Image (cartoon, rainbow, N blue to C red):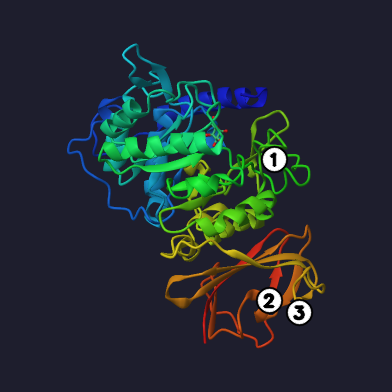
């Protein structure tokens, strides 16, 4: 953990402790807020079914809270997500990240950190289920997790059984210190999948084996999702160019990726054909609504990404049929704010959840007025640097997302054939607004703020 992470973790522990005092879980559960009795569910229930062939939608504390999440925070977030529309919009998985683990007992049994999760994971799972969510957990393929806490190396079958007994529905398997070689990593992932299957509980396996371009070749047939890059950070650039001064969690230029870095990642594009229903690309979690960071390390009240960049983060993750895992603080989601409008946009969510699960391919990229290298097509007329992505949808429709990569507002008209269409569609719907867009024979006209994305659903003629 870097010094910045350690400072942030301490600040967040303090903030969480304070928040835990004022937040109470669901009113129908007895007991003092924060006590174990308050997590006791009178009639254990299962949450509504989810279709596990679709990308997971949920929330994970890591982008906002690092490895410092606690039971009090998770309970408060569950309560917030039930109230603020996130649950209703489909964010159904509450995913614990690194930091929940206590020591492994002499018997070999994995335990939860007693200070952070005083009531244990089984009670938290029952509470989460009763609130209509599913619970995910984090572990590592090595003996120690990335934080240095206990990992599952040498204990795969035992930990899979423990997770099942606790009522866990999803396992994020990290790789720090484990075998990254394709044969070694494949064997580890296979053992995990087999161990989870042996419990007979449905548990999604989400793999983070380093994000290099070769991972998909083996992970796509074993895992529900696999990471296709480093840790996301709250900045447009981090690898390609320097991050913004108030970037969130851009600790390393080598490992952490901004939104632009993911948009231009060749590894993601190479692995896209391997994805499909039940096996999704994972460009890491969303930075929609996360806070900017002061140089001192504390959170600022502004967002890390501009509203336009948050729109691109969300629209493109949906275009790739990636897991939509919110990384914000749902307790701070202001109704009607840019983050709320983006995260709760059901039309864009539907693109992500489309039954074909086919990631978008890059139809055109370059500078308007200049034909793309190697492309025989005409170029968009206008100005600006752009990417145009095309995603086939079930029922013969097509989603098109056009990203303004320029650091300035830009406008251009994209000929239909540059978008992979033979001619103008019968109908075009602007998915941000839900309004019908005029269909011009010459192409799709876009005006976009810097780093913004226009997203349309087209119906063929
Ligand atoms: C790695 C993962 C992150 C997060 C941290 C936790 O960096 O890539 O997603 O889980 O570990 O320590």
Residue at 34% across / 17% down in the picture? 108
Q: Crowdedness of circle 2 by 10 Å Cα count: few (<14), some, many (20+)?
A: many
Q: Is residue 35 visible?
A: yes
Q: Position of residue 265 (x, y in %)?
A: 67, 52
Residue 378, disc: 3
Tell me which label, 3 or 1, sits earlier in the chain. Answer: 1
Tell me which label, 2 or 3, sits earlier in the chain. Answer: 3
Do tag 2 and tag 3 residues touch (Cβ < 8 Å)?
yes
* Residue ID for mark 2: 418
From this view, report whether residue 310 is shown above or below residue 351.
Answer: above
Residue at 53% across / 35% down in the picture? 62
Q: Crowdedness of circle 1 by 10 Å Cα count: few (<14), some, many (20+)?
A: many
Q: Is label 1's Cβ within 8 Å of ligand 1?
A: no
Q: Is residue 61 visible?
A: no
Measure the C-alpha gap from mark 2 to mark 1: 34 Å
Q: Is residue 278 left or right of residue 444?
A: left
* Residue ID for mark 1: 247
Do tag 3 and tag 1 residues touch (Cβ < 8 Å)?
no
Measure the C-alpha gap from mark 2 to mark 3: 7 Å
Q: Is residue 416 left or right of residue 93?
A: right
Residue 38, disc: none
Q: Position of residue 446 (x, y in %)?
A: 69, 73
User: SS at mark 1?
Assistant: loop
Q: Is label 2's Cβ within 8 Å of ligand 1?
A: no
Depth check, mark 2 against mark 1: the one in front is 2
């Amino acid at each position: 953990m870097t010094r910045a992470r350690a400072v942030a973790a301490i600040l967040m522990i303090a903030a969480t402790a304070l928040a835990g005092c004022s937040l109470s879980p669901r009113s129908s559960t007895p007991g003092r807020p924060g006590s174990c009795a308050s997590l006791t569910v009178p009639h254990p229930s299962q949450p509504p079914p989810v279709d596990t062939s679709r990308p997971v939608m949920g929330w994970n504390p890591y982008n906002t809270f690092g490895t410092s999440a606690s039971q009090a925070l998770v309970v408060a977030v569950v309560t917030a997500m039930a109230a603020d529309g996130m649950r209703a919009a489909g964010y159904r998985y509450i995913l614990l990240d690194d930091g929940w683990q206590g020591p492994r007992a002499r018997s070999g049994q994995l335990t939860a950190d007693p200070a952070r999760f005083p009531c244990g994971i089984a009670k938290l799972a029952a509470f989460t289920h009763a609130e209509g969510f599913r619970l995910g957990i984090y572990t590592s393929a090595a003996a120690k997790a990335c934080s240095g806490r206990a990992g599952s190396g040498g204990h795969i079958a035992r930990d899979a059984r423990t997770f099942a007994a606790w009522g866990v529905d999803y396992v994020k398997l990290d790789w720090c210190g484990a075998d990254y070689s394709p044969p070694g990593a494949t064997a580890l992932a296979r053992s995990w999948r087999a161990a989870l299957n042996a419990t007979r509980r449905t548990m999604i396996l989400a793999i983070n084996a380093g994000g290099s371009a070769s991972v998909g070749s083996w992970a796509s047939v074993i895992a529900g999702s696999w990471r296709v890059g480093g840790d996301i950070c709250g900045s447009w650039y981090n690898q390609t160019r320097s991050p913004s001064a108030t970037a969130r969690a851009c600790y390393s230029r080598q490992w952490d990726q901004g939104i632009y870095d993911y948009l231009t990642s060749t590894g993601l594009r190479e692995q896209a054909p391997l994805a499909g229903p039940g096996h999704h690309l994972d460009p890491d979690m969303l930075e929609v609504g996360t806070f900017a960071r002061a140089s001192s390390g504390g959170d600022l009240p502004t967002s890390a990404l501009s509203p336009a960049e948050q729109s691109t983060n969300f629209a493109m993750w949906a275009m790739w049929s990636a897991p939509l895992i919110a990384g914000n603080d749902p307790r701070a989601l202001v109704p009607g704010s840019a983050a709320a409008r983006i995260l709760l946009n059901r039309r864009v969510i539907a693109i992500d959840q489309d039954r074909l699960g086919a990631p978008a391919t890059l139809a055109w990229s370059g500078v308007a007025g200049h034909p793309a290298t190697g492309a025989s097509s005409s170029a968009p007329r206008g100005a600006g640097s752009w990417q145009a992505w095309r995603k086939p949808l079930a029922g013969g429709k097509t989603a098109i997302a056009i990203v303004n990569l320029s650091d300035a507002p830009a406008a251009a008209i994209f000929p239909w054939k540059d978008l992979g269409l033979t001619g103008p569609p019968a109908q075009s719907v602007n998915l941000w607004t839900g309004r019908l867009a005029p269909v011009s024979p010459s192409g799709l006209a876009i005006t976009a703020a810097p780093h913004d994305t226009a997203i349309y659903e087209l119906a063929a003629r």
